[in-house]
Every structure is written in structure tokens, then in C-alpha cells.
Amino acid sequence: MATTIFRMDDSNITMVRGDTLALGINITDEEGQPLNVDSAYFSCKKNYDEPYVFQKSLNNGITKSSDGNYVVRVAPADTASLDAGLYFYDLQVGKDGDVFTLLIGSLNLIHDVTTN
């Protein structure tokens, strides 16, 4: 399987639009033990007050790969029709009624050269 190449500075991501992004996240509790979350959302918007351009959720784009390890998969179709430019995202999880925002930042979509 191919490895997606993207750059993550702090929590800002740069990726080529129309490519696949596979983002691995390890979620643990305060003692460092794997945490099985009740919900997870990776949400992306052009502007904070506009509708989502795409959103991933647990078992619908976010999968649990092993104890405490999750993979957020942004499919090519999620970004292929978007304009290149700056978007905003966050990764939010829920456990036992609590909500935690684990990542928040910008998603910079850059133009693709090869189109299929």
C-alpha cells in the first residue's frame, strides 16, 4: 500500500487535493493507557461559519486499527472538487459524555498536477 506524504507543522496540514490522506492518531488516557472512544469526528470547513466541506466519523472514515490507534482517511473524492486554498479542520472525540478536541488547525489544499 502506498504511503501518503503530507506535511504537518504543529497541527497544520498541507496536502494535494484529490489525493488520499491517512492520518494516524494514538489516543490514550492521562495514564498513557489506550482509550477506546465512543465517538470521533474529523470536520473540515472553508470558513468556520459555513457548512462542512466534508466530515469523517467513527466507522465512516475513521477506523480503529488497534488499542488506542485510529486512522482518519480522507478519500480522493472528498477534496478533488474543492478549490485549492486554506480550509480549517478539527478532530474531536467523545468518551463517557465528555468531549475532547485533540487537533485543530488549517488544511492547505495545493493544486494537483496529475489528474485522472
Image (cartoon, helix red, strand yellow):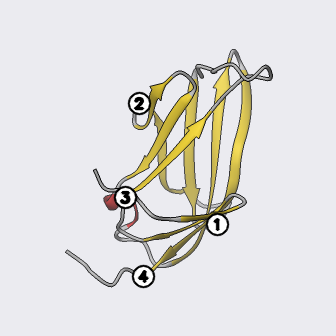
Residue at the spot of label 3: 20
Sequence order check: which comes first, mark 2 or mark 4? Answer: 2
Q: Which of the two discs, 2 and 3, sits closer to the camera?
A: 3
Front position in the image: 54 or 108: 108
Residue reaching furthest to the right: 30
CA distance separating discs 2 and 1: 26 Å
As shown in the figure, which amino acid type bears the numbered disc 4? His
Residues marked 1 and 4 touching at CB (< 8 Å):
no
Residue 47 has which mark?
Answer: 1
Alpha carbon separation for disc pair 2 and 4: 29 Å
Q: Residue visible at 38% across and 56% down?
A: 3
Q: Nearer the viewer, mark 3 or mark 1?
A: 3
Q: Helix, strand or loop at disc 4? A: loop
Q: In terms of secondary structure, where does tag 2 sit?
A: loop
Q: Amino acid at mark 1?
A: Asn
Look at label 2 and name its amino acid: Asn
N-terminal of the pair, mark 2 or mark 1, is: 1
- Circle 2/circle 1 CB separation < 8 Å: no
Q: Amino acid at mark 3?
A: Thr
Relative vertical location of residue 115 with respect to residue 14 in this rendering, above or below: below
Residue 45 location, quadrant: bottom right
Point out the residue furthest to the bottom here: 113
Q: Does residue 70 appear left or right of residue 4 in this picture?
A: right
Dot 1: what SS?
loop
Q: Which badge, 1 or 4, is on the more N-terminal residue?
A: 1
For residue 59, the mark is: 2
Q: Residues within 10 Å of mark 2 (few under 14, many from 20)?
A: few
Along the line of sight, the residue nearer the viewer: 107 or 23: 23
